[in-house]
Image (cartoon, rainbow, N blue to C red):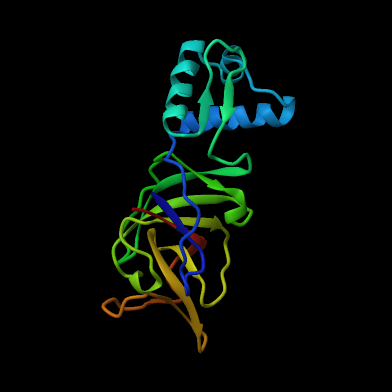
Amino acid sequence: MFAIMFDLTNVREGEEMTEKLTRRQAEVLQEIRSFFRRERIAPTVRELASRLKVTPSTVHKLLRILREKGHIELRDNISRGIFLMQTPVTSVSVPILGHIPAGNPVLSEELYDGYLEIDSNLVPGGELFALRVDGESMIDANILDGDTAIIRQQEKADSGEIIAAMIDGKTTLKRLKITDNKSYLYPENPEFSPIEIIPDSEVVILGKLVAVVRKY
């Protein structure tokens, strides 16, 4: 079971999420949704194969996986027997780009790791990406080791917001605090020390935390 948390000062359980998809699976599911919206009917296997530039047998295999993961229903002996199931038509596919430390910053390579399907009504607009959380420096904000952080890409943030940032080529997830003309990346765990953003440091804000996904 998955849950999504939004209000990080008063965390609450959110909607159940579907199982993670690979890039190819997400592309097939998105094409099915687009076809439904455009044509008001389900696509055939051959139509999907043509649009995705793969063989019909590959489409059959991907459709079976999507059925097993609960996204669609398949009805045999019907040319347009694909029916969307649990994942809403308004969902968005959020790419998972790798891991982000929630402890002392370390290098984080943006390794592609599939997609998460999230109801678009539960997250703000804009370009979203997801990062796995490593470490325990944000536990008092209910962000735990192994969680998935949903980040909205943006280059600026306000004091008090939790952000994904890169400092001198190293990435971390912290709360931004600006006081007395000084800026800090604050942990939410007293066992960790704040990181002062000194003038000579190269700091890039990758985005703002908008949701946390946790698997139980």
- At which x and y percent is residue 214? 39, 55
Residue 136 sits above or below residue 41 on the image: below
**Nearer the observer, 70 or 106:** 70
Residue 169 placement: quadrant? bottom left
Residue 140 sits above or below residue 92 on the image: below
Q: Residue at x 43, y 46 (%)?
A: 97
Q: Residue at x 33, y 53 (%)?
A: 216
- At which x and y percent is residue 195? 37, 75
Q: Residue at x 57, y 23 (%)?
A: 82
**Nearer the observer, 192 or 149:** 149
**Nearer the observer, 56 or 151:** 56
Could you tell whether 215 is left or right of 206 in the image? left
- At which x and y percent is residue 124? 61, 57
Q: Residue at x 73, y 28 (%)?
A: 38
Residue 123 placement: quadrant? bottom right
Q: How many marks?
A: 0
Could you tell whether 81 is left or right of 212 in the image? right
Residue extending farthest right:
39
Could you tell whether 87 is left or right of 42 in the image? left
Residue extending farthest left:
191
- At which x and y percent is residue 207? 52, 60
**Nearer the observer, 5 or 51:** 5
Residue 6 sits above or below residue 81 on the image: below
